[in-house]
Image: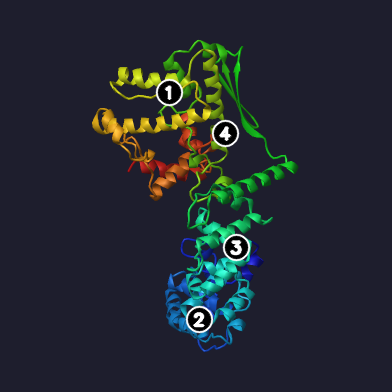
Amino acid sequence: MTSEDTASRRVKFYGLGDYGTYFQVERAAEILEHYDATRTSYSVSEIIELYNAQFFAQNNLFPPSYTKAQCDGFKAQLPEARKTIAKFFNAINEANVADVVVDVDFDYHTDLLDLLAQYKVFDRCSATTILPALEATHIGVGEMLASKRVVQSYAEELRGRLLAEPRHAEHLIRKYLEKDARRLIHLPASFTSADARTLLDQYLDDDDANPNFVELIATAPTTKVTGIDAKLKLKAKRKHDAWTKDFFKNNTGIESGCEVSISDTQAEPVEASLDGLVAKYSYSRRWLEDNLDYPTILNNFLYLFEFADRHMLLALPSYYAELGVFERFLKTTGKDAYPVGAAFQVKEQSSFLQTVMYDRFLKTNDIELESVIEWFFADYLKEEFGAEKLRFVPSSKMSSYLERVRHLFSEMESVVKQFSLYVENGELDNDLLAITSEQVRYKDIPSLLVGKYVYANDDQDIRKILHLLFSDQSGLTYIREDLQAHDAARLLIKNQVAYDDFADHQKRSVEYLVDLVGR
């Protein structure tokens, strides 16, 4: 923003947590300095600017050059300023509202609606008068829906406006489906789930429908309140797939993916490389053939395919620290969507291909992967940990893939229930297992270890620690060309890093972390 743009914009109080507020302290003081309680003629934008300026004085935000006497003088003017504001809005009625609210600055739209509600203008003016007046000053349906009082006062009229344009379905999507939507959306009480479905259906027929919002509909849960059912989801999926296919007809995009292979000449058990954004994994056939015992087969998923790290923490989930800056802030994400990015997609593709490759390789050696898992439960757990009666039943070799998948999901749920009962009772009682009907909730699975799981809360220090140590956006990931890493934790673990290696602007963050250790 240029200095000219800044100067031409009116004062706006964004709140104490927004830097935009503090940049306007000087200008807000000028508004209060020139305030004249005897003046009788104001435009609506001038009144709203005065309304914003008084919040600066109310919160003791004055230029540093001002004396205490000057600050106290400005605060003493606030009651008169509020009277001026109240007098202006109390004078608005059916006859003059269209002329009064004309040409309000965009930044003041929310303030205007709040003040009209505060001074009961909506009680004095009909929908046929005030809604066109608001629309004439470029206040759209979305901004009206953000005002609870507007929606309550003109429910039926706003319902009609919502249904009149397919693009208004985006307000429903922001309310029900989009994560971190910019504003709250209130819907008229008369707006039904059938209305919602009709509007969303029309939106999917619109050639200008936003592909991101179409994808949110396709991946949304089916609920009555949103009007989204299986048919609507399928229609959205087909539309999004068609859009994607058409898009890449004329846009090459960036090649990404994963390749997995077995080498007859390779000496190392595994060699990994990155060709652009394509991850490549090559495995030694000789090494795989020399290690076909059941314990090593399972260990290969840990040490060869790296499904878990050395602390036995699963490496496959999508971790927030792995999301890029664009994936965190510019991607349209659903409220119930699993947050994924490019890093997760590589892990998902590679783990799938590694499993398929290994399963086929083992079958060429007359070994069924499910038989290895059965051995783990029947023999290994009993011999190594004394955990008896835990079992896994492999699927039939003659079953179709669909039948095997269904069976495996059932066995997964059974394994979790068995383990939960074993932890709670010290043994597995199969009769108790047979009558246990509670749905499995993975986050509630107990552990034999005390304090095994640690979850971060919203404490400011914890959030800052996680950002500094594990985010690729941390200021501690790069020291010089030969001393850098994806995150600060890896940088510090894999290298001998001295305090003086950090630049001066990084040392403050390092000192912050050191101070926390000493607490």
Whole-percent x, y for residue 15 in the image? 48, 65
Under tag 2, what secondary structure? helix
| Circles 4 and 3: CB atoms closer than 8 Å | no
| Circles 1 and 4: CB atoms closer than 8 Å | no
- Amino acid carrying label 2: it is Val
Instruction: Report the front residue among 3 and 427.
Output: 427
Instruction: Report the front residue among 110 and 477.
Output: 110
- Mark seen at residue 168: 3
Whole-percent x, y for residue 239 in the image? 64, 48
Between marks 3 and 2 in the image, the one whose residue lies nearer the viewer: 3
- Amino acid carrying label 4: it is Val
Q: Earlier in the sequence, mark 2 or mark 4?
A: 2
Colour pattern:
rainbow
Name the residue carrying label 4: 346
Residue 248 placement: quadrant:
top right
Residue 201 placement: quadrant:
bottom right
Name the residue carrying label 1: 394
